[in-house]
Image: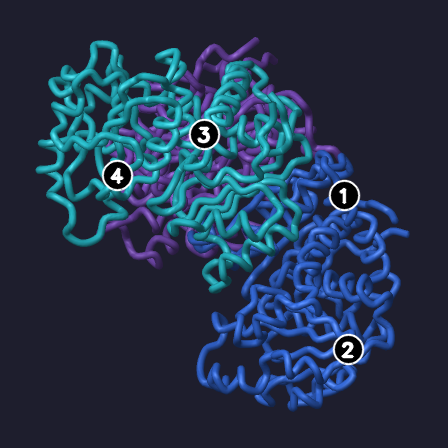
Chain colours: A purple, B cyan, C blue
């Protein structure tokens, strides 16, 4: 089977088959990173541009490592050192990059929809590495790979997302992907940070965290995006942590074999207690490892590879 | 034939044979970027340092892609993350880099003459990627490649450069190269932005844009370098755009088959109307594509390659 | 012989055999950088992360070139473009990077001990590329390689370190390494910049530079770290230069065949006179060349290579 779409913009229209294709391919690539020689010639001569309009360590590094382990050439462009400061439009930057014949452009941008603009304008494959508060599909795919790896399946599991549901692109992509894969998804957080009508996405809303965690198989904590919060819509950090921090007692509300996830970087003591983040239920670092594998899979599939 | 010079500092002393050598070599390399596997082993084991003292996306990325498509190792150094902030002199930085045995150093610097200092000090090949308001030879070479590709020849064509002739390194390098290749060059812009005595370079001056464009085969618009303009020598942006913006009616003054060029990034609605920049006469994106090919050619020739 | 330690954190506990192993291996690698094709496949498929929390040109570039000449993949992370700004702890960043399966992490950090934290937390090899005022072991190793190359041996030589002994990580690593290798080390500088009890490290203190230089075989000038000096513990620059700048007359106090070293970047006219920095006694650029070779050796040995 091969991926027939040109771009990875979001999971809103991903089919079960497509998600399984990506996860199965990632599964087969995970082993490469455990070898002594962590490199295969699969994408030799392929050019991948990492175009990051927002600071990032883990996502950019993950894509760069993924590209290099497949022998692709990775070119990093970050706004701090680019002519973006010269006021060029996103469309002109995109057309300019296209003219240099890259094969895949990975873009992170503060504006929702920026990757979609590129996808429409360019012949190349575009991967959304996070667009504003909209989607972060590669994160959700690595999350689903981790759940499947730890639980054997996604279907039928109770997955609870906790935090700023409204502004989280990680939450949005996971809601699309997890419900599509048959998980029962509950979102939890301060009422003002849960978008109205979110039930329409097929999820359950529960603002009381103890109740939300009942029988949970998977607890996915979201990062408090202090750097994106402006204004007073947000309760105090102390108040937030008192109600929504995943502590050891809070964790007892979930199933005994529940796993704890977080996209990172974590705010210790705010959304998650250190003992939980570092505890044996945590699969946070498995998520990072799976991130490289998922990105290798996406680069491979977009370049025309088959599983 | 091979290139006998060590450095590419500017086009002021480039011969017709040398320009043709670079353009012919670039022509033969252009095809590589259209392959599925965009990589040849030609420069394996060659180290190219991109030393950028000014922010840049297109030029730095173009050089990096050119190096990687030839299998050279590319090392990027930009001032924002370098010890340049520690007050080291350019000469000391240069000698330090030399001691690490790179083969080619590509430098962009805000000061005219910076690449020449490196060229005198170092045994390595230096490529000027733009030095202040002085020269930008790789841009002019890609411009000439584009003209030759679209028009079959450069000799005898009327080429009109429009904008801030005084401060434009792109204009200066093109004036040297185009006149050497036998083009009839007209420069056009506000009188205060045209250097006195520029006719000595073998070009015609015309401050009225309608008149300048009469019978033009090639219109080369320059970027308004707002980030380099200080003080009041410059008319207001609105006044400038009214007189010198390349609009659809303005374009009708030129020949029916005239091509429109711009080194980018473009200021839409200031020096060029969006309909013209995106119109069928525009070869702006061909310039970008040719940029990779020209830089591959230069890296190849400086490393001792022959055409 | 092979290196049995996992990390290169400092020279405080390096044995004579270990230092000789690194220097001998570096000696054998130096030749690679003189070839036309400066690349061997030795570390193909090995991932090296350069994690720089302080600005750097020479050290980061040196490590990147060393990695690439051995065909390793080098990933650069610098704080200016990373999620370090998102307030993640060093430990969490480290565990995240570990989960991406790099083989070696090179870290520079403003805090003494940062590399040791990584070394304890991670299974990967850590190389300290400078931690605060603590150690800079790869610099001291390249310094010793240079001394051995120029003088045939280190044992028995009189080596004088001049400058801010208190705050210099270069001085500290060299004091450990040079005394271990049997050099007679004298430290010299303003009394307030010499740590109390430094004699316990087996070195001699002399605050008068003329006296310190008597019979010196090697003069190692330290960089005045103006960017790290805060407060008024430091004499004026003019006063400092008058007493401790290595001028031509000052140099005459040393042996006729004494060599002059400096880790760079140099402050011309402050700690060293231009004529001395550029004179025939200076081996400053040999140090840079040897830096690439020493770093190649360390990457090779940490990846399991043998000499």
Tell me the quarter of the image containing the N terminus of chain A.
Answer: top right
In this rendered view, identify the residue nearer to me: C247 or A118.
C247
Residue beneath label 3, please? Answer: A106
In the image shown, does C287 or B148 lie closer to the viewer?
B148
Q: What is the x, y in percent for residue A245?
A: 42, 51
Q: Residue at x 33, y 37 (%)?
A: B172
Residue on which the image places disc 1: C32
Q: Which mark is residue C120?
A: none
Q: Position of residue B193 (x, y in %)?
A: 19, 42
What is the CA distance from the residue labelled 2 to the residue labelled 3?
59 Å
- Secondary structure at badge 3 equals strand
Residue linked to disc 4: B198
Q: Is residue A146 left or right of residue B175?
A: right
What chain letter is assigned to the residue under label 1? C
* Pointers 4 and 3 in contact (C-beta within 8 Å): no
Which residue in the protein does label 2 denote? C256
Cα distance between the residues tagged 2 and 4: 57 Å
Q: Are marks 4 and 1 on the same chain?
A: no
């Amino acid at each position: 089977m091969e991926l027939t779409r040109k771009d990875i913009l979001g999971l809103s229209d991903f089919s079960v088959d497509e998600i399984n294709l990506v996860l199965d391919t990632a599964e087969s690539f995970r082993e490469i990173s455990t070898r002594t020689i962590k490199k295969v010639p699969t994408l030799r001569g392929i050019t991948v541009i990492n175009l990051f309009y927002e600071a990032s360590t883990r996502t950019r590094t993950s894509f760069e490592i993924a590209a290099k382990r497949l022998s692709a050439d990775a070119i990093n462009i970050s706004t701090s050192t680019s002519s973006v400061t010269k006021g060029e439009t996103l469309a002109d930057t995109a057309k300019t990059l296209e003219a240099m014949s890259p094969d895949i452009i990975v873009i992170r941008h503060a504006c929702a929809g920026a990757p979609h603009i590129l996808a429409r304008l360019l012949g190349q494959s575009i991967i959304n590495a996070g667009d504003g508060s909209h989607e972060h599909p590669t994160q959700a795919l690595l999350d689903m790979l981790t759940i499947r790896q730890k639980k054997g399946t996604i279907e039928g599991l109770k997955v609870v997302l906790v935090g700023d549901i409204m502004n989280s692109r990680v939450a949005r992509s996971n809601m699309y992907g997890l419900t599509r894969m048959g998980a029962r998804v509950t979102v939890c957080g301060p009422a003002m940070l849960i978008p109205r009508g979110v039930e329409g996405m097929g999820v359950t809303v529960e603002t009381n965290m103890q109740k939300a965690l009942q029988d949970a198989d998977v607890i996915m904590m979201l990062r408090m995006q202090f750097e994106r919060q402006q204004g007073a819509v947000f309760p105090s950090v102390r108040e937030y942590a008192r109600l929504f921090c995943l502590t050891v007692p809070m964790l007892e509300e979930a199933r005994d074999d529940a796993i704890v996830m977080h996209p990172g970087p974590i705010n210790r003591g705010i959304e998650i207690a250190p003992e939980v983040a570092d505890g044996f239920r945590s699969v946070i670092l498995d998520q990072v490892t799976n991130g490289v594998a998922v990105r290798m899979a996406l680069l491979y599939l977009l370049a025309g590879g088959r599983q």
